[in-house]
Amino acid sequence: MSYRSDLVRSAERELQALPAAIHRRVVAGLLRLSDEPGPRGSRKLSHGPGWRLRVGDYRVLYTVDDDAPIVTIYALCQSGSGIDPLSAFSTDPP
């Protein structure tokens, strides 16, 4: 099954702000989510509604709606940035 990927506005801005080489790697990771929403390198968040995908030093925070089927990307952040993963999901999906 193929999933549609939606990015919330803040995640779009974070993606556009990445350096070109990192941008390409993160986009490749996002494309993998369309085919398999739980690819290698992803983990279900233990205290929240979503998932985390590791792409190098960056993390993609997202949710999966199997009924729709939609993957909603809420945030892109550098690991160790101190961003609380649960705060990323307070943004309304597109």
Image (tube, rainbow, N blue to C red):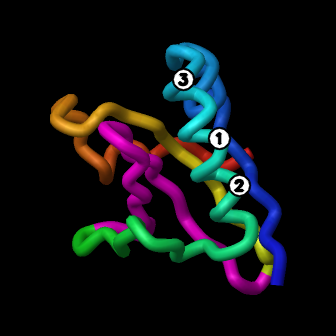
The quarter of the displayed image where residue 52 is located? bottom left
Question: Counting residues from the N terminus, which is met first, the one under dot 2 or under dot 3?
Answer: 3
Cα–Cα span, label 2 and label 3: 16 Å
Q: Which residues are magenta?
A: 48-67
Mark 3 lies on residue:
21
Kindly identify the amino acid type of the residue bearing the numbered disc 1.
Val
Determine the residue positioned at 24% across, 43% down. 84
How far from the left and from the top, in percent, is residue 16?
Answer: 63, 19
Q: Residue at x 36, y 74 (%)?
A: 44
The quadrant holding residue 1 is: bottom right
Q: Position of residue 62 (x, y in %)?
A: 52, 57
Residue on which the image places disc 1: 27
Q: Are marks 2 and 3 in contact (CB under 8 Å)?
A: no
Membership of 49 in magenta stretch:
yes
In terms of secondary structure, where does tag 3 sit?
helix
Residue appearing at x 25%, y 35% in the figure = 83
Residue receiving disc 2: 31
Vertical position of residue 71 compared to residue 12: above or below: below
**Residue at the extreme front:** 21
Q: Residue at x 31, y 32 (%)?
A: 78
Query: Which numbered disc, 3 or 1, marks the residue that appears first in the sequence?
Result: 3
Q: Amino acid at mark 3?
A: Ala
